[in-house]
Image (tube, rainbow, N blue to C red):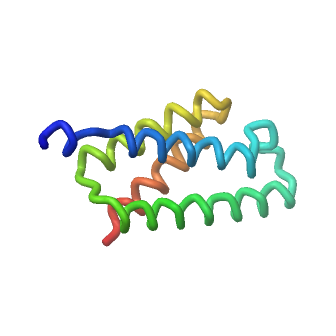
Amino acid sequence: MLGKLFSGTQVDEFAKTMARDLAKHYPPSIEGDGKKASARKLSGALEELYNRVAHFKRENRLGIYRKAKLGNVLRWELKELGYSDKFTEEITKGVIVRLAQK
């Protein structure tokens, strides 16, 4: 029981999938190019990402440990995909804020 309570496999997979999906819709190569189309792409991608986070939170019991794990896995996956530190931190903060909201 206790092992299942703290198992983060589902959280890990969700965070990695979110990062990969973000990379499909807003690749690291267009980050910071300043074009209006890129800003719209980012806006749409983030809206989808944050909606998925809210849905995941409603469907799964996430305590402090799992919320922190989700944010941490997401952060490292985004960095591994090639996003800048600033971008990675902003996305991670946005996800954590949505996880913290009631």
- Residue drawn at (44%, 66%), measured in percent from left and top? 54
Q: Quadrant of residue 27?
A: top right
Q: Is residue 28 left or right of residue 17?
A: right
- Residue at 47% from the left image edge and 60% from the top image edge: 53
Percent from the top left, x then y, of residue 100?
33, 61
Above or below, comparing residue 92 to residue 41 in the picture: above
Q: Nearer the viewer, residue 77 or 32?
A: 77
- Residue 91 pos. (x, y %): 54, 49
The residue that appears at 44% across and 36% down in the rendered structure is 73
Vertical relation: 73 (above or below) 80: below
Viewport quadrant of the C terminus: bottom left
Name above or below for residue 25 compared with residue 20: below
Question: Which of 55/91 is in front?
Answer: 55
Residue 6 x %, y % = 22, 40
Q: Is residue 81 left or right of residue 11?
A: right
Which residue extends farthest left?
Answer: 2
Q: Quadrant of the N terminus?
A: top left
At a point 50% along the width and 31% down the height, the residue shown is 76
Residue 49: give x, y in percent of width and height: 58, 58
Quadrant hosting residue 5: top left
